[in-house]
Image (tube, rainbow, N blue to C red):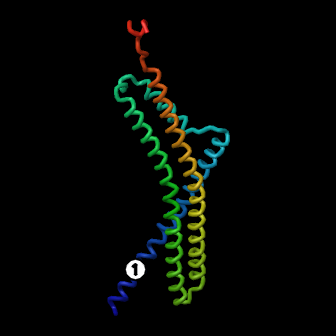
């Protein structure tokens, strides 16, 4: 029993130590979500003005790729690689939002359970002010964690639609540029003597 009590004491100490990193992580995620929402709002306004910064940047990179004469023999492969890199960058841009969706509720739950353990310990010792403070922390962290997760999920839904639209537009620009180059480089067949007689 003494060993079990010792292990329980160690776990209680470890969980109590984790409270500060959990609360600090939630505060950091709050700042992160506010910054992400500002960037989201700016992009939304740009798209309302029909300004697609990602597609415009890709279009400039595509033009530069076509102007690079050294890559002429393998131009199609270079352009395909550029398209894949741009699409991968768009997909990776969603990882930050998805990270908040997954991590925020977990931190909120940890921030709830740890103070509840402290509150029960305070209740056993008859320290009501400490118990009340721990319960406030417990309920606050879970609410903040869920709010962050919901906000990130809503932004993620909208941004995924934007990413799919940007990818379609980039694929369209690439296909058009390759076809235009192919047409411009086609050499018309010269008429031979037999053609003239016919």
In the rendered image, which quarter contains the N terminus? bottom left
The percent position of residue 158, horizontal first and vertical second, equals 59, 53
| Crowding at mark 1 (Cα within 10 Å: few <14, some 14-19, many 20+) | few
In the image, residue 170 lies at what x, y percent? 51, 38
Residue 151 shows in this picture: yes
Q: Is residue 103 above or below residue 192?
A: below
Residue 187, x across and y down, in percent = 42, 17
Q: Is residue 185 above or below residue 8?
A: above
Residue at (50% x, 52% y) in the render: 94
- Residue 190 at x, y percent in the picture: 41, 11
Could you tell whether 79 is left or right of 151 in the image?
Answer: left
- Judging by the rendered image, the residue that carries numbered circle 1 is 11
Asked if residue 89 is positioned above or below residue 23 in the image, the reply reads above
182, 143: nearer the viewer = 182
Front residue (pair 130, 5): 5
Q: Circle 1 sits in a helix, a strand or a loop, which is it?
A: helix
Residue at (49% x, 26% y) in the render = 180
Q: Is residue 177 left or right of residue 190?
A: right
Seen in the image, is 44 located left or right of residue 168? right
Can I make out residue 35 in this image? no
Q: Quadrant of the C terminus?
A: top left
In the displayed image of the protein, which residue is found farthest to the front? 198
Q: Residue at x 47, y 29 (%)?
A: 179
Res 70 quadrant in image: top left
State the residue lying farthest toward the bottom.
1
Q: Is residue 159 above or below residue 81?
A: below
Left or right: 132 with respect to 15? right
- Residue at image coords 67%, 42%: 48
Residue 76 occupies which quadrant of the picture? top left
């Amino acid at each position: 029993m003494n060993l079990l009590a010792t292990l329980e004491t160690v776990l209680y100490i470890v969980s109590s130590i984790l409270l500060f990193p959990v609360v600090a992580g939630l505060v950091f995620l709050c700042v992160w979500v506010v910054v992400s929402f500002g960037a989201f709002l700016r992009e939304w306004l740009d798209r309302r003005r029909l300004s697609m910064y990602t597609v415009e940047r890709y279009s400039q990179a595509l033009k530069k790729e076509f102007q690079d004469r050294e890559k002429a023999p393998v131009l199609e492969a270079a352009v395909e690689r550029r398209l894949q890199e741009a699409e991968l960058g768009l997909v990776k841009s969603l990882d930050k939002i998805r990270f908040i969706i997954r991590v925020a509720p977990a931190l909120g739950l940890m921030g709830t359970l740890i103070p509840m353990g402290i509150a029960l310990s305070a209740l056993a010792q008859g320290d009501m002010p400490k118990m009340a403070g721990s319960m406030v922390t417990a309920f606050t962290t879970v609410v903040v964690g869920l709010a962050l997760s919901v906000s990130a999920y809503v932004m993620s839904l909208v941004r995924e639609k934007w990413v799919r639209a940007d990818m379609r537009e980039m694929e369209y620009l690439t296909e058009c540029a390759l076809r235009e180059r192919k047409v411009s480089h086609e050499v018309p067949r010269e008429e031979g003597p037999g053609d003239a007689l016919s």
